[in-house]
Each structure stands twice: as structure tokens, then as C-alpha cells.
Amino acid sequence: MRISTFAGLVLGLGAADAAHAQVLNPVQPWGSWLVGTVQLPGSATNRWGGFVEAQARTNAVFRQYFYSELKGGATFDIDPNFTLGIAGGRYTTSDYQDLGAGPLNSEKRLWEQIILTQYSHRLKIEHRYRIEQRWFTFRDDRTEFRQRFRYRFNAFLPLNNKKIEPGTVFLVAYDEIFLNPKGPVFERNRVYGGVGYQFNKHLFLQVGYVNQANYNYTSSQGQFILQNTAAKNNVVVNLTYKLFHKNAKAQPVEKLPSQPD
């Protein structure tokens, strides 16, 4: 895939979602996601890995904080391109205008996933399949259990090297769909496009844009429609620090700096 084609795909996906959001959500402000991640990928000599991540989201860009995530998990490499994972976390949503009142809801989440990766001459592709179990506690003491299925198609394109390694600038884009077994089946779509840089063997920075849209099913019309005020554009800043096993040799294939979210 040519660099121009990749860039066009990223811009096209973002522009289409942004245009759809502007029609239905004309007053939604841009928000921001601030993400810090520590990753320990599996290696040729030790297939076990893991991660921890903290995330904060704001209603406006870098202000009006309302949401946080704290999560972590373990991974196991069946082979270099096939990884199993299990993880969990705590997620809280608050009213940014009244943080002192406590969370509107808190969620405890457990998930299991499979990641398949494909490497071409330059383009790197990742397929992620995830099943989630979610336990909610609301401010009025109500509780609720939900499940969800997710699929993410993620692509990386290094610009100045064939691999993502120290000193590499790379493009990244993904589209993720969220499916709810109880309905609406097509619950959410998340489109991301950004640029990253690997400073050294440990440190990565990604800056990008994500549009997240929630959907309802309208039986009278027989089609999916975007919920009013549910689609939102966000600036994303992600800083990732990669650890290595003490006895790790050279990696059999490069490990992509994917966002665990």
C-alpha cells in the first residue's frame, strides 16, 4: 500500500465520521483523551507479557475532566503473530460540572481477547477480537451487568524505516465496532487516525484524532441511526513505555505499539 493511499484512507474515514457527527451533533465540543501505558511484550524466550494503563478524558480539549480508566492485564504469545490476552479494569464517569458529587456510574470490566498480526514489506495490520463482561454501579445504587463484543482493524505504516524502531515516524489508523448481544446490536463505532514516533527502544508517542459514535436501532425505520449528541471528536495523546524481559533476545518480529484501549 502506498503512503498516499494510507493517508487518504485515514483522512477519508475521519472526514466521513466527522461530517456525519456535525449534521447530528452541531454543538458537541471537541474533547481529549490522555493515555499513559506501560507494556511488557512477549519475546522469543518468554511468551508471557502484560500491560498497565491509566486514561483520563475531558469534555473539552484538555479541560472539563469527567472520565477515567485504570486497567491492566496479561498476554501470552501462541506464536509471534498470535497473542491471547486477559485483562480487567475500573472505569468511572462523572459530571464535569459537579465532580464533588462523585461518579455518575462506575464500571468493573473483565475481558478476553485474541490479536492476530500481519506484516508486509512496510504495512503492519492487526486484527483484535475481544469479549467483555461489565458490571455497573450507578449513583442511585442500581447495578447492571452487560456483555459486549468488539473487533478492531488496526494499521501501522512506518514512514522513514521499514520497521517501527527507534527514530521511526509512523502513521496509525483503526476502525473498531462494538456489538451488544442484547441490542442495539451495533452499539458503537470508533475511528482513529494519528501519527507516532519511537524515541528509543522504550518510549513511544502517538498524537491523533478519534471519533466515537453510539448507535440506536429504530424498529419503525428498520435501520441504524446515530444517537443525538452521541458522536464526539477527541484529540488523543498517548505515551507508551515498553519494558523487556531480562533474558529477552532479539524479537522474532517487531511488536506494534498498539493502544490497549
Image (cartoon, rainbow, N blue to C red):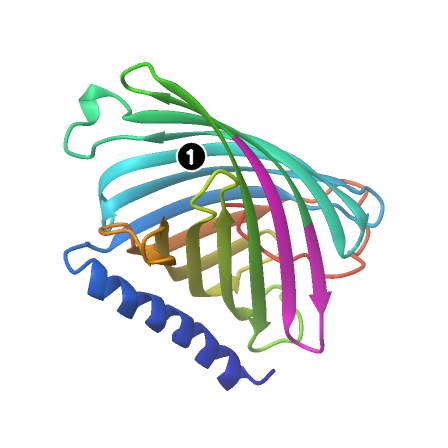
Which of 182 and 190 lies nearest the eye of the viewer? 182
Q: Residue at x 76, y 52 (%)?
A: 82
Judging by the rendered image, the residue that carries numbered circle 1 is 69
Q: Quadrant of residue 85?
A: top right
Residue 130 is inside the magenta segment? yes
Which of 62 and 60 lies nearest the eye of the viewer? 60
Q: Which residues are magenta?
A: 115-133
Q: Residue at x 78, y 48 (%)?
A: 43
Q: Position of residue 146 (x, y in %)?
A: 48, 31
Residue 87 is inside the magenta segment? no
Q: Quadrant of residue 125?
A: bottom right
Residue 167 visible in the current orientation: no
Q: Is residue 46 above or below residue 98?
A: below
Which of 51 and 223 lies nearest the eye of the viewer? 223
Q: Is residue 167 above or below residue 121?
A: above
Mostly what secondary structure, the magenta segment? strand
Q: Is residue 212 above or below residue 247?
A: below
Q: Position of residue 174 (x, y in %)?
A: 51, 62
